[in-house]
């Protein structure tokens, strides 16, 4: 579509359908009868030829269904002079599944103090810091959890999702390596729609380094991108989360571009959940 109406449309193999130099017009999902829960998440302006593969990837994003989690909370818990960090979230639904992605900014161990959590991963860095993943089935009305360091004064990056009742953990893959691009490939997926997260994390051991950021690409959508700087005393840390829902392949490899000045290795994971 452009400002005058439909320019052209086609299905099948990508090729030049029609082209126009007029202004683009964004169409909403109501007028084009996409999925009932679909939404347009982004758009692009083209002034040059774009490979059909890139167009296919952007169409995947544009027509993505609304993700199936019930709630999510994401952010950083700053240095508070104590060992404990308490994270609050909306009251939970009985039987739902929570998943927590946590990154500790040093080689000081983290512990989930709230009962009921199952530790799925500790991915240690070759230098400092570690990525932690926990899951648990919750009761109705729960509103917080507490994570503790073994030593006071360190910040915490976190992302906690609540998946609907009937959801289950499927599998994960993890790795530590020098730079992020393609996250670890997760094989053995069922080939029916699953929710897959990609996670990038790192420690910041140098005071004064610039902010780290990540862009998830080619059908993978960014969910959070949080950096905590080194304060001259304790290390900083970084956590980014992306996802793709309704993924029906038998393997998944999240694609992400990380922009940073860190020399330390990244802790990375790809994790899948079956969601009703």
Image (spheres, rainbow, N blue to C red):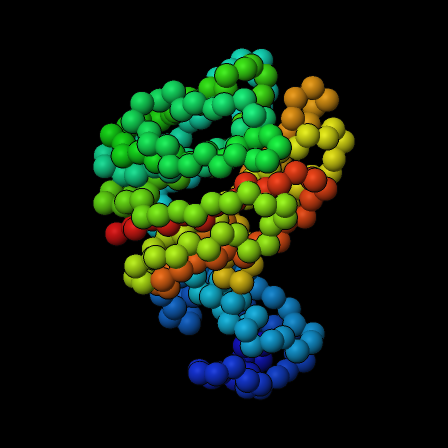
Quick check: can you spot residue 31? yes
Q: In percent of the image, x 29 and y 27: which residue is there?
A: 116
Q: In percent of the image, x 59 and y 26: which residue is there?
A: 106
The percent coordinates of residue 10 (x first, y second) are 47, 84
235, above or below 173, in the image: above
231 left or right of 25 in image: right
Q: In percent of the image, x 42 and y 70: which residue is there?
A: 31
The percent coordinates of residue 143 (x first, y second) are 35, 26
Residue situated furthest right in the rendering: 208
Residue situated furthest front in the rendering: 126
Question: Image quadrant for the N terminus?
Answer: bottom right
Quick check: can you spot residue 85? no
23, above or below 175, in the image: below
The percent coordinates of residue 120 (x first, y second) are 37, 37
The percent coordinates of residue 92 (x first, y second) are 30, 33
* Total numbered badges shown on the rendered structure: 0
Q: Quadrant of residue 36?
A: bottom left
Q: In percent of the image, x 30 and y 51: which residue is there?
A: 274
């Amino acid at each position: 579509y452009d400002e005058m109406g439909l320019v052209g449309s086609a299905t099948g193999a990508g090729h030049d359908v029609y082209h126009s130099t007029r202004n683009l017009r964004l169409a909403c999902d109501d007028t084009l009868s996409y999925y009932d829960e679909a939404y347009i998440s982004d758009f692009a302006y083209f002034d040059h030829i774009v490979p059909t593969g890139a167009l296919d990837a952007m169409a995947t994003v544009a027509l993505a269904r609304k993700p199936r989690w019930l709630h999510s909370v994401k952010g950083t818990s700053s240095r508070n002079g104590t060992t404990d960090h308490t994270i609050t979230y909306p009251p939970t639904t009985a039987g739902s599944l929570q998943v927590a992605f946590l990154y500790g900014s040093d080689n000081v161990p983290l512990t989930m103090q709230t009962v009921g959590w199952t530790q799925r991963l500790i991915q240690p860095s070759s230098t400092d810091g570690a990525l932690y993943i926990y899951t648990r089935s919750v009761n109705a009305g729960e509103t917080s959890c507490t994570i503790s360091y073994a030593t006071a004064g360190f910040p915490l990056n976190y992302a906690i999702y609540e998946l609907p009742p009937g959801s289950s953990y499927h599998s994960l893959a993890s790795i530590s390596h020098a730079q992020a691009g393609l996250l670890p490939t997760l094989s053995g997926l069922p080939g029916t729609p699953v929710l897959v997260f990609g996670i990038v994390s790192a420690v910041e051991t140098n005071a004064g380094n610039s902010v780290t950021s990540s862009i998830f690409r080619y059908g993978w959508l960014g969910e959070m991108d949080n950096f905590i700087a080194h304060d001259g005393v304790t290390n900083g840390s970084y956590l980014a989360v992306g996802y793709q829902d309704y993924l029906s392949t038998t393997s998944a490899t999240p694609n992400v571009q990380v922009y940073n000045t860190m020399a330390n290795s990244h802790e990375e994971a790809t994790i899948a959940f079956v969601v009703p």
